[in-house]
Image (spheres, rainbow, N blue to C red):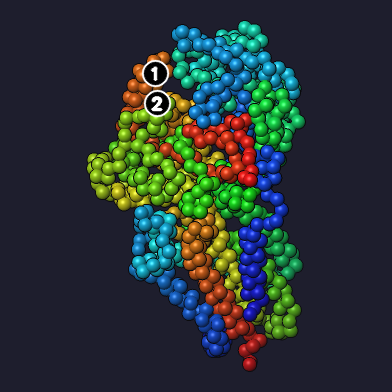
Amino acid sequence: MSDSNHKIVNRLLTALFVLLASACSLNYESNVESGNRDQILHLGNGDEPQELDPHITTGIPEFHIQHALFEGLVAKHPKTMAIEPGVAETWEVSEDLKRYTLHLRHDARWSNGDPIKAGDFVYSWKRALTPALGNLYAYMFYPIQNAQEYFEGKLDDFNLVGVHAPDEYTLVVDLKAPTPYFLQLLDHHSYFPVHPPTIEKFGAFGERGTRWTRPGNFIGNGPFTLKEWKLNRILIVEKSPTYWDAARVRLKEIHFYPIPNGSTEERMFRAGQLHITERVPLEKINVYKRENPAALSISPYLGTYFYRFNTTHKPLDDKRIRMALALSINREQIVERVTKGGQIPAYNFTPPDTNGYTPRARISYDIDRARALLAEAGYPEGRDFPALELIYNTDEGHRSVAIALQEMWKQALNINIRLSNNDWKVYLDRESHLDYELSRAGWIGDYLDPTNFLDLFVTNGGNNRTGWSNQRYDELLNQAGMTGDQTARYELLQEAEAILMEEVPVAPVYTYTRVRLIDPTVRGWEDNILDQHPYKYVHLEAAE
Amino acid sequence: MDNARSSPSLWKDAWRRLSRNRLAMLGLCVLTVMVSLALLTPWIAPYSYSAQDLDLGATPPSGAHWLGTDAFGRDLLTLILYGSRVSLAVGFLATAVALTIGVLWGTVSGYAGGRTDAVMMRTVDILYALPFTIFIILLMVIFGRNMFLLFMAIGAVEWLTMARIVRGQVLGIRRQEYIEAAIVMGLPRSRIMYRHVLPNVLGVIIIYTTLTIPNVILLESFLSFLGLGIQPPQSSWGLLISYGVETMEEYPWLLFFPAATLSLTLFSLNFLGDGLRDALDPRAATD
């Protein structure tokens, strides 16, 4: 045997040993065991958080951490997601539903012991709306009188915005129109308060990325406070002794691990390194269903997985083509054979039963009609149809759905689709600059209301990204925003949804489910449609 | 004319020795079969490479699907056959690019010596220092994605080691008496390089080539995985293996068969390379 063969054999052997070593469980105490003893929760948290500032971030991993570090005026019940008191103990709503008077509890404190005053909220919301800060979630404040005008720079005086603190423990909010979901917004991170002296200490009022969110500098008001943050390795929060409801908090610490790779995360879970994972790799779902169903948690999730069409691009500017593509997706097959996580096929954009609203408009699965439409649009049997490019962000799950769709379209319409995976940032960039033809997308609800979904597609909306615009649709959403009566409001939204499903700037594919692995020792982690889990109710109980 | 008279005997000799080496002949046979299968794929593949049967899903090897199917119900044998076209093409073509540049560069640099050598080798050092991935990504961004570019990009990176190895060998050979004799006889430089230097480094070149091919095949899968190489539903061995690794525990055959095919090719190449080195060694010509 020659020298080069020896080298290869050696390499193979080394690889084998590494595999064996990682497969054997080693004998030291695992994170889960020690965590159960000390009430330390180990959480897989997807990507590394970019920032902890609640007025800057938009991502899910950041939100998971912010929910531990901050508390809004109201909170949510872990199971029903009903509104519960947070920093505000009680509140009253005026008769025209446009004025909210919130009474702050006197024992609410920042993590350095300072009392939380109504003025802190006015300060924080002013900061969140300061144009220089560039808060991408500023539109969450638009129901408030003059908030939009202030953010867009049409108004310089914040006193004209509908937020006032008549005394230290009372906050009065004036709305533009009755907004049935307004209380829910108060639990969104963009509405979280920040500690004014800390902000001022580390930078100017509207300055981004200052050092105030670093361990040691950080002051928050949540049930936990920041202890340690090692980039790309771990972020640790510990129980805050100054939190008003500290008696209820049973966890001592939560360790958030950034693990972008699903297979890595699953192996860590199996090795007892994590209590809860952020996701489960597709091919592992059936293994767990069969071998460890107790650890697998599948719960409905308020989110829609869909494909965007670039409506400014030929031939997708023709709605018959878009409709033909949308009609030939076999959604049942995708959820049953590809994603396999109990997802629900989506035939309209807003998930079913979003706070009592279930859209009536439907896109069906109808290949014959799809073919007819394609022929009508000038491409009988897909002849001369240009090959379209479909972009998705690098992820095994997105790739699988894309491969399945590619073949479905080929079979049904005889058209060719090129797949192209992109890095997350490139993908976002291409999508928002309309530099694509087809693009996979997902939208997760921030609060329980259909407008949270339908608002996406108003003309020039920041998250529209299809180039689609429809005057009637804009009017309907505008009207719905002015209507206080829930039934009348939902009727307007039904009509808007019908337009959306008629014009198909997007093709819904399925309604998300949240699939996680959860160690059976975790208690108080309830399934709910928003996938929010108030940590103060969570604790660990080792099996006897 | 001189050349034409004496070469046949060298190659005939080499072939005689090679055909006596059983392992090498086995390697050659396997490779021939692989290449012919790859060439004939469109006619012999049992299924279409994009045809899915989602309801069937992943099944282990059976009568209908000899090597089983993947999660989309695609026939694995078909995927491997189509993948071999991409992988072997990338493997051979990119290696050919690397070989041409590397051998030329190394021979000239080693033979010329002095300042020419220094300049040429420092160029190689500088290129070595460039991070490979960024280099390829840059090429892809500038020139766009296509298969031909993929060959060129990989080849353009792989020739560096080849150039160094060849230069080292040439440096040693240059000091041999027969080269000095050739110089004294007044042979032109190019002729000395071609007639006397190259045959003596052939063994090393062949060995290194057989190592480069599997390397290049794996590189292609890495690039495709990053979205810079080929994209689904097209396939290559490297891609099949990287998908296979993800689903290793659930569907082991999706890893086993592509990996076995790649390993078989790799071993064949190595055996053949070994045999060729022994057969082509000019010092063994008088045995």
Residue at 35 percent across and 63 percent down: it is B47
Q: Quadrant of residue A341?
A: top left
Disc 2 marks a residue whose amino acid type is Gly
In this rendered view, identify the residue nearer to me: A245 or B158.
Answer: A245
Q: Are marks 1 and 2 in contact (CB under 8 Å)?
A: yes
Q: Which label is found at residue A453?
A: none
**Residue identified by numbered label 2:** A356
**Residue identified by numbered label 1:** A486
Residue at 64 percent across and 43 percent down: it is A542
Q: Secondary structure at mark 2?
A: loop
Q: Secondary structure at mark 1?
A: helix
* Label 2 crowd bin: few (<14), some (14–19), many (20+), radius 10 Å: few
In this rendered view, identify the residue nearer to me: A58 or B133.
Answer: A58
Percent coordinates x, y for residue A86 in the rendering: 60, 21
Residue at 56 percent across and 74 percent down: it is B267
Percent coordinates x, y for residue B6 in the rendering: 56, 88
| Chain ID at mark 1 | A
Q: Is residue B258 left or right of residue B284?
A: left
In this view, B221 is above or below A74: below
In this rendered view, identify the residue nearer to me: B257 or A201.
Answer: B257
| Chain ID at mark 2 | A
First in sequence: mark 1 or mark 2?
Answer: 2
In this rendered view, identify the residue nearer to me: A464 or B120.
Answer: A464
Q: Quadrant of residue A88?
A: top right
- The quadrant in which the C terminus of chain B is found is bottom right
In this view, B109 is above or below B7: above
- Residue furthest to the front: A544
Q: Is residue B21 left or right of residue A31?
A: left
